[in-house]
Amino acid sequence: MSKDDFILKAENLHKSYRMGATRLDVLKGIGLAVKKGEFVAIVGASGSGKSTLLHILGALDKPSKGTVKFESRDLNRFSAGDLNRFRNKAVGFVFQFYHLLDELSVLENVFLPAMAGRSLVGWLACRRWAKRRASELLAQLGLAERTKHKPYQLSGGERQRVAIARALMNEPRLLLADEPTGNLDSATGNGILEVLESLNRAGQTIVMVTHDERIAHKAGRTVMLADGKMKD
Ligand SMILES: Nc1ncnc2c1ncn2[C@@H]1O[C@H](COP(=O)(O)OP(=O)(O)O)[C@@H](O)[C@H]1O
Ligand SMILES: [Mg+2]
């Protein structure tokens, strides 16, 4: 297999937090390789370092040691501008608590990532396209009738669908999901997993972290995170 088959490759990742005089070692040598088109679930108990790992994979945080390669390029070598583009375009994030902006409509929440990183002129030039894409994504996720709502007017499952649409806005090559069903009842959570499965069938690469093994089994491959290390 050529190295280009991996969209994401993490090697020997360590992450420690300094808390006063003590040091908390959360990640102690993580290796993870994800192929293009895969749906990987990382399962670990609460506090095992799942969010820490996902943030490092998406360049929202830096490891204390080790490398993350995205499409064979080492994130450690990215300039600040490269990192901003990477976070905004290459990856999409879905969080447990949605992180939607209540002042904005559902449609505005979804197209917001298309505004980020653009000048006013650049935005005006693509605004019509962005609104259309946001509407199409919302329709695809069963929310065609909710575009003018505010997030607080939606159910939890609907909010998470909006958050997924927002994460997909800039056509990310990698979708990162941090306990996307963690705040939902099991039927609604299953609906969200079905959305992720269908995105994956259409070619979307997904890395999801969860504490729930039943949820994880819906993914194509499951790895365990325990004691700061990965176990198959
Ligand atoms: N910014 C931080 N400073 C200090 N400790 C942290 C920080 N972020 C996370 N931790 C600690 O690291 C451990 C792993 O946290 P986290 O990655 O959020 O776990 P999980 O997502 O698996 O529940 C926890 O013990 C947590 O308290
Ligand atoms: Mg977490």
Image (cartoon, rainbow, N blue to C red):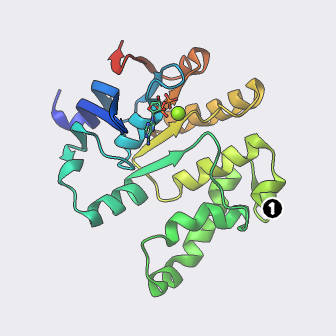
Instruction: Look at the image and tell me in which quarter the C terminus lies.
Output: top left
Residue depicted at x 65% and y 56%: 100
Asked where in the image residue 66 lies, by quadrant, the reply is top left
The amino acid type, in three-letter code, at marker 1 is His
> Residue 142: x, y in percent?
74, 47
Q: Residue at x 22, y 56 (%)?
A: 78
Q: Is any part of residue 68 visible from this angle?
A: yes
Ligand 2 is within 8 Å of the C-beta of the residue at disc 1: no
Vertical relation: 150 (above or below) 29: below
**Residue 44 appears at what percent x and percent y?**
48, 20
Q: Nearer the viewer, residue 10 or 226?
A: 226
Q: Residues within 10 Å of mark 1 (few under 14, many from 20)?
A: some
Q: Which residue is mark 1?
A: 149
Q: Is residue 49 left or right of residue 131?
A: left
* Residue 113: percent from left, percent from top: 52, 64
Q: In x, y percent, where is residue 60?
A: 39, 50
Q: Is residue 133 visible?
A: no
